[in-house]
Amino acid sequence: MDWLIWTGAAVSLIGVVILIWCATIALRARREATDEADLRARLHRAVLINFGALAVSTFGLMMVVVGIFLG
């Protein structure tokens, strides 16, 4: 089950990279926002991306755990 562990680690790493990208989106939105509504819209998008990235990362970690239990 080594393939499941390594695939899960890669999926989890992709999730972490997306989380870092999401943080840069949020920081850029705070700097470039012109008004409150614009900031809310940009941060809403960042929150949605953040939840997706957390789900991807969690799924990858679950794959690693299952690979360890089966291996």
Image: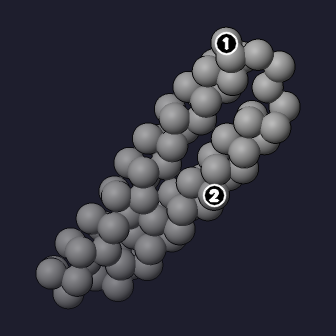
Q: Which mark is residue 20?
A: 2
Query: Going 57% across and 54% down the picture, which residue do you hit?
Result: 19
Residue 37 shown left or right of residue 52 in the figure: right
Vertical placement of residue 15 versus 53, above or below: below
Where residue 46 appears, x then y in whole percent? 59, 35
Instruction: Pick the quarter of the image with the C terminus.
Output: bottom left
Residue 31 shown left or right of residue 37 in the figure: right
- Amino acid type, mark 1: Ala
* Of the pair 33 and 48, the residue shown nearer to us: 33
* Element assignment for label 2: helix
Q: How is the image coloured?
A: one colour
Query: Going 38% across and 63% down the picture, which residue do you hit?
Result: 60
Asked if one can make out residue 43 in the rendered structure from this viewpoint, the answer is: yes
Residue 2 shown left or right of residue 40 in the figure: left
Asked if one can make out residue 7 in the rendered structure from this viewpoint, the answer is: no
Mark 2 / mark 1, whichever is N-terminal: 2
Real-space CA distance between mark 2 and mark 1, rounded to the nearest whole angstrom? 24 Å
* Element assignment for label 1: helix
Q: How many marks?
A: 2
Q: Which residue is farthest left?
A: 69
Residue at numbered disc 1 = 37
The answer to whether the residue labelled 2 contacts the one labelled 1, judged by CB atoms less than 8 Å apart, is no
Q: For residue 32, which quarter of the picture?
A: top right
Instruction: Pick the quarter of the image with the N terminus.
Output: bottom left
